[in-house]
Image (cartoon, helix red, strand yellow):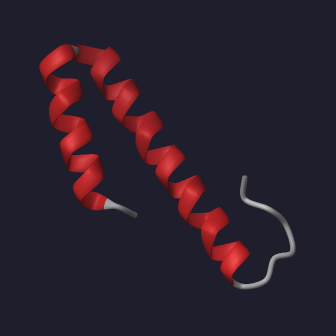
Amino acid sequence: MPTRWLALFGQIVDELFTGSRATEIKLRARKMGNLFQAKIAMARAGGGFAIL
């Protein structure tokens, strides 16, 4: 997971949003990052599908 990107993204979110809205946005970013990483790993392992 690209932790640097998530840290920077989290800082910006915290500057622009508060409360449950900020929490939800950051959670969705982590989920998207995990999904991207999984798809990239599968493609590199020869999963046989396009990631885009």
Q: Is residue 24 above or below residue 50?
A: above
Q: Is residue 8 above or below residue 44?
A: above
Q: Tell me which corner region of the image, top left, top right, bottom left or bottom right, holds residue 9.
A: top left
Q: Tell me which corner region of the image, top left, top right, bottom left or bottom right, holds residue 39.
A: bottom right
Give the residue displayed 71% in from the left and 85% down from the top.
45
Give the residue displayed 31% in from the left and 17% down from the top.
20
Give the residue displayed 43% in from the left and 39% down from the top.
29
Q: How many marks?
A: 0
Give the residue displayed 62% in from the left and 75% down from the top.
41
Instruction: Tell me residue 43's x, y (percent).
Output: 72, 74
Instruction: Tell me residue 6's x, y (percent).
Output: 29, 48
Q: In the image, is 34 to the left or to the right of 51?
A: left
Q: Quadrant of the N terminus?
A: bottom left
Q: In the image, is 5 to the left or to the right of 35?
A: left
Q: Is residue 14 above or below residue 8?
A: above
Q: In the image, is 41 to the left or to the right of 50?
A: left
Instruction: Tell me residue 11's x, y (percent).
Output: 15, 35
Q: In the image, is 44 to the left or to the right of 21?
A: right
Instruction: Tell me residue 33's x, y (percent).
Output: 48, 52
Residue at the outermost bottom position: 45
